[in-house]
Structures are given as structure tokens and as C-alpha cells.
Amino acid sequence: MEKLVLVLLAAAAARSLAAKHVFVSTRLSWTDAQEFCRNSYTDLSPLTNYLETLVFRQSVSDDQSGWVGVYWTTSRCSWSGTSGLQQTLNVSLLWKYERLFVAKKLELRGFFCLNLIVVQEEKTWEEALDHCRENHHDFTSLISQTENLLAQNQIQNSTITQRVWVGLRFLGDTWMWVNSNPLSYQAWTQTGDQDQHSPVWKRCGALTKQGEWENRDCEEKLHFICV
């Protein structure tokens, strides 16, 4: 069974890097674009590390340019999830010609939204994988602390199971994202299963409402996150 799953995952890898980010051509100020993304998707697209930027670059077209979820405070550059916690300047970053540029927040531009889709249907891990690939694009990966926090924020509703499936699977002798993203960021619970690093039965990964990752029995039925 594990070998079969590995073959199926490898076959789908070629289409795995798109759809996590959505381009909206409507021209808005940075603040209005942030509000739109939070209401209609998850948030403005975060670009907080090299891997996030790489996945983003592979998700958008060369001719698309617009706001992303990074702005300037009086002391440093921050992502949109911390907005309101620090004194901000009137400038943010926009993506253009595969680079980031500084622009005034009031300028009207298109923008990019991160699109994490929480599906409130209880399914096994493999059923959830099939659902994501048939109805959306793929299971989500969580490749930074920022993405992990944004996903955590999306699952706080009491109607959502206490943990949700994400695209983490233990195959062969290692944990991996099923969309082939590197497992460079990790958020495993420190109080979880001692079998976590080399699981025998609990070989699928879930995100808890506390923002931690747990290894769970793949046959358990949970809600899940797609992109």
C-alpha cells in the first residue's frame, strides 16, 4: 500500500505548485486588497522566506503584478498577519517583473491572495487527498511559520474538527509534503506521540487548533485543508 501511495503522489507532483496563490486584477489600495483577501480567501500572499517566494513565483504568470502581504513598519519589514500590532509606514511591497518593489499603500493595483480552503467534510487522509485533487488542486503544504499561523487561524471555528488533515505523509523512512515541497519548516507537537519520528501506524499529519502538527492514524476522519 505504501509503495502504491508513493507512486500516485509522484505522478501528481508535476501539477502541484500552482493554485496556492490567486491573482486578483481589480485595482485596490494595499489596505483594501488585504481586506478583500481576508474576506474572500485567506490573506494577502506572504513572502517570508525563500521557499515561499519560490512557490509563489511558480504560481503566478510573468505578466501579473500587484500587492503582496508585506509592509514596512518603522523598524522592519513585516507580513500582513501582524498588521495593527506595530506602527506602520505608508509603504508596502508589490510583485513585478519577478521582483519586489516598494510602493505607496494608497496606489491602486492588482494583488495576490493566499488561498487555503478548509473543507468541513470528515474524511480519511487518502479520501481527503482525492477530494482536494478532484475538486480543488491539492492538499496544502505549510512551508513557513507564517503559513502555519494563517492555516491555524482558518480552523478556529467550533464547527471544525479539533485537528485537520494537511498534506503530510510518512513514506519510506521520512515525512514529506505530498506536493513535493521541501519539509524545511516543522511544527511538531512536543507532547505528542513518541512514535512521531518513525511511526508504525500513525503515518499521516494533521494541524491542531493550537498550531501544532500531530501524526495520526490515516483512517481517522477529519476535516482538511486544500489549495
Image (tube, rainbow, N blue to C red):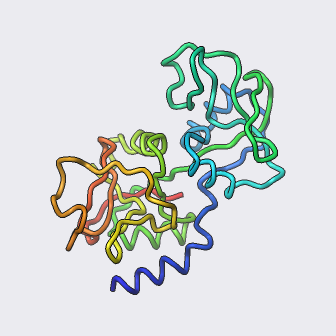
Name the side, left or right, on which 45 lies relative to 111.
left
Which quarter of the figure is the N terminus placed in? bottom left
Vertical relation: 211 (above or below) 117: above
Q: What percent of the width, then of the height, locates residue 126?
A: 38, 73
Q: For the point 59% across and 18% down, which residue is it?
A: 73
Residue 57 or residue 205, whichever sits in front: 57
Q: For the point 56% across and 13% down, which residue is it?
A: 87
Vertical relation: 5 (above or below) 221: below
Residue 123 or residue 181, whichever sits in front: 181
Q: For the image shown, how many numbered marks are present on the structure?
A: 0
Which residue is farthest right? 63
Q: What percent of the width, then of the height, locates residue 81?
A: 51, 31
Name the side, left or right, on which 197 lies relative to 12.
left
Q: For the point 48% across and 45% down, which residue is it?
A: 147
Q: For the point 71% across and 21% down, which residue is it?
A: 91
Vertical relation: 143 (above or below) 218: above
The answer to whether residue 183 shows anywhere in this view is yes
Residue 31 sits in quarter: top right
Name the side, left or right, on which 208 lies relative to 190.
right
Residue 39 or residue 84, whichever sits in front: 84
Q: What percent of the width, then of the height, locates residue 189?
A: 25, 48
Which quarter of the figure is the C terminus placed in? bottom right
Q: What percent of the width, then of the height, locates residue 93?
A: 70, 31
The answer to whether residue 161 shows anywhere in this view is no
Residue 4 sits in quarter: bottom left
